[in-house]
Every structure is written in C-alpha cells, then in structure tokens.
Amino acid sequence: MPVSRIRSIVAAGAAGVVAVLAATLMALPAARAATGDGSPTDPNIAFVGRWDRSTSSAYVPNWAGAYLRTGFTGTTVKLRQRRTIDLYYSIDGADFRYLTNVSGTVNLTPTPLPAGNHTLVVSYRVVAGSYTGDAVFQGLTLDTGARTLPAVVRPRLIEFVGDSITLGTTSSRTALTAYGWLTGEQLGTEHTQLGYGGGCLVATADGCVSVASQFLRTGYAANSPAWDFSRYQADAVVINLGTNDRSHGVSGTDFQNQYATFIRTVRGKYPRAAIFALRTFSGRYAAETAAAVTTVTGGGDRNVFYVDTTGWLPADGLSDSVHPNDAGHRAITARLAPVVAAKLSTTPTPTPTTAAPTTAAPTTAPPTTPPVTTAPPTTAPPVTTPPAGGTGCAVGYAVTGQWQGGFQGEVTIRNTGTTPVDGWTLQWTFADGQRISQAWNAGYTQSGGTVRATNASWNGAIAAGATVNFGFLADVTGTNNRPGGFTLNGVACTLS
C-alpha cells in the first residue's frame, strides 16, 4: 500500500477518535465546584440578600446590606475580586474591618490566624443603593490543604425596604450601622436592606424611582432581572417609604392607594411574613400609611402592622435634616427590635444558619408605649452539662429602656475561665416581681422570681474570654432592682 494511502487512513482514524472524544466530552455534565473549594458555587458559602448568580464564576450582590458568610480552616484567607472595591469583613466574630480601593487577590489575614476553624463575613460598601466600586465576588483563596466549612445560617431573615435612610446614608459604616442591620443583629436573624437613595414609593414623572416596583427585581437598576423569590422567604418585612414622595408631588390619596397595593405585593411574595409599615421619621404621609395598613388588615390580612415612630429619634439623632446618624440608628433599633421580635414565630423552622451576632444591642430612651409582647415558650429548656474545671463567668445586666409597667433588659455573659463553654444555662432571681414576657437570642423559663435562660442554636459555644448577649422584655410594677444569684451551668458568676 502506498505510504500516502497509509497516512490518509491514519489521519482519518485520528480524526474519528477526536470526534468521538469530543462528542463524549460534550455529553458529560458540566463540572461542579467541589464542596470546600472557596469558589462562588461552593455550597459552604452562604449568600444573604439578593445576589446575581447568573455567572457561576462571579457572584454580584444587589441592594444594600447583602453579605456572604462561611467557615474555613487554616491560617489565612484571601478574597478574589475582579476590580477595585471598598468592603467590610469580620473574622471569627471580631469587629468589622474596612478596606478601601482593593482589587485582585485581597489578603484578609496579613497576620496569620492560629491554625484551626474560623468564620468569615464579607459585606461590600454601598452608597445611595449602588456599590462603591466593582462588587464582584470571584471566590476565596485558602492555605494549601485548607477548605471552607459550612456556614451556620440563622433560622430567620428580615428584609428592610426603604430609601437612603434604610441604607444608612451618612452613618459611619453605611449599611452596617443602619437600623436594619443593627436590628437583625440584635434579634439574631439574617437581614438585608433593599433601598435606593432618593427613592419613592410612587414612580413620578420627574424621575423618582419607585422602590416598590424595584422590589420585584434582583437589583436597583431599571433593567435588573426579575428576582427569584424562591431563593429565600423573609420572615418579616419592614417598610420605611414616603420621605421623598412629598417633594415629587405625590398626592396623599395616590400614596395611600399605592402603599396598600405594595403591601399586597409583598404579601404575595412572602405569604407568612409579618409586615411592618413604619411611620416615616419625618412624619410625612403618616396618616396615609396608617390608613393603607387599615385597608389591608380590613381585607383579612392580620399579619400587617403600622408602627408609630413618633419620638423615636433623639434630639442629637440626625446628621442633617433627614438622615439619622449612628446614635439615631441605635435609637431606632432599640425601639424597633422589640416590636419585630414580638411578631416573629417563637419556634421557627430551621434553615442553614451563621455565627452568633457580634453587634451589641444598642440603647436609647425608653419607649413611650410598651412594645407588643408574646407569651413565653412553654417547652422545657435544653439540658446543659456544667463545664469542667478552669471555669468562671461574669454577667453584665442592664436596663436599656423602661416605661410604665415594663422594661427592656440586656444580659451579657463572659466566660472568664480557661476552658470553653459548650451549651449554657444562665439562672438568676428577680426580687421585685419582674416577669419576662419575651426574649431574643435565648430561650427561657420562669418560676416565681427564678429565671433560667438557655442558649439559642447559634450561640451555645462561649470560648475562653468570649462573650454572648441576649435581651428580653419584662413586666414590672413599682421598684425594678437588679436581680442577683447569677449562675452559669451551676457555677456562680460575678455581676458587673
């Protein structure tokens, strides 16, 4: 056989093999990210809020207050960013650190951590609803042999809808120091903020963006794709709209009608959520907002509530004529958190969860009216094992608000020992007839003056030197002295 003929046969055979291999490869399923590899599709990374996940190699957060959280092993963690961005991050529950104008591979641990398991939260900085820079998450880089760990996602989520006030504009850390973020942290829930600087409830001819319309989208851009509401279901939605509509000529009647329509839209997307319509802090459209709620509740929806915010902001609570400063947002949180907590289910259905809240509950002046309360749980608290030797504890007890017939309290537990606590029960005794009606970040039972508070699912572990805190509402008549006899898992604690 001629050599040229042989070469032709070989070439044809090789081409056939290549075609068969190509067809086989095309038939194989697309490669998936390995669990623990730190890529955007790594199931160990939880993305809270509205993220555009249409590109598997780069996830983009939309709206304010979106964040990601995960666990990881090793001593270092680096963030892979496409282009320049400002961001906040927290490792192992520490205070958030702020990085500006970073891009590429961003080292979040310039000083390596002790070897072991760690947690990470990242939130990109927003201004007026848009991100400062290129908020595109392309993954994490870890030590050789290290991996991510499943994020612990809190069992409930609150969505805050509004304008620049909800976004935290003019506060020190924007979304992170706004009342939405602070309220979620105080209540131990996941949380996200949907808002647009200068946004209105009603779209206007002179260009005011309707936040109510954009609520249905993944982001604040007019051409943003429709949001997939199966991604998560909010347990509560807090609406604060109306501050900007007046200056755009929206009539009271139009505002009231469209507010009622928006509440029904939210209900259609979140059938089980408690919906709160806040009186704007400036008082604009207060009567129309209340009337819209009345219209909806009169139609049979009893899980919608008008919240009168009159007097919530202290005299020094504004940074300008409209926007709360840090003190103002803390004051709002102290009033809002008990109201929301009272309407959240006391026994939520667990979903994937995150680390314990790291923001201490802010304090402010007492409410002018008692917050709505719920009956205490009737189930027995979980049994905990007293810690071994080398233990000690200190308890901080504070009344953060008081009104006729009731008060709000905050308790901080510090492990002053040398060994970690794994599951805790804190016991104390009231001497003046105080009666707890509701608690957050802890379960509780009360018999006479004796109270036993038990850890929630996310805050049972207290490392040596670390703290956890929880809050409660209680009824009281007359004297309200501090309680005594604090013990942690049977060990006496000092009271600070």
Image (tube, helix red, strand yellow):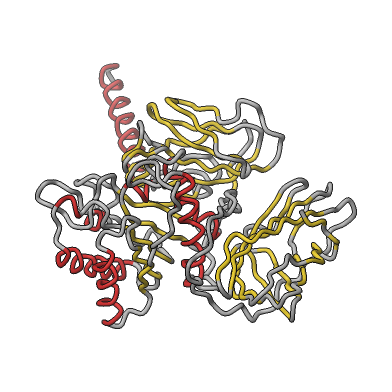
Residue 119 left/right relative to 125:
right
Q: Quadrant of residue 376?
A: bottom right
Number of marks in the image? Answer: 0
Which image quarter holds the N terminus?
top left
At horizontal 40% and vertical 69% (from top left) the residue drawn is 273
Q: Foreground: 379 or 450?
A: 450
Could you tell me residue 156's position as x and y percent?
49, 63
Rendering coords of residue 159 (x, y %)? 40, 58
Residue under the point 13% across and 52% down: 204
List the single residue furthest toward the top: 3
Where residue 343 sits: x, y (%)?
A: 47, 72
| Residue 133 at least partly seen | yes
* Residue 111 vertical position relative to residue 306 in the rendered view, above or below: above
Find residue 426 and report its image quarter: bottom right
Q: Where's residue 37, x and y in %? A: 53, 40
Task: Identify whether 99 is placed above or below 165.
Answer: above
- Pick the front one: 13 or 441: 441
**In the figure, is residue 352 to the left or right of 194?**
right
Outermost residue, left side: 205
Is residue 28 in sight in this rendering? no
Q: Residue furthest right?
A: 389
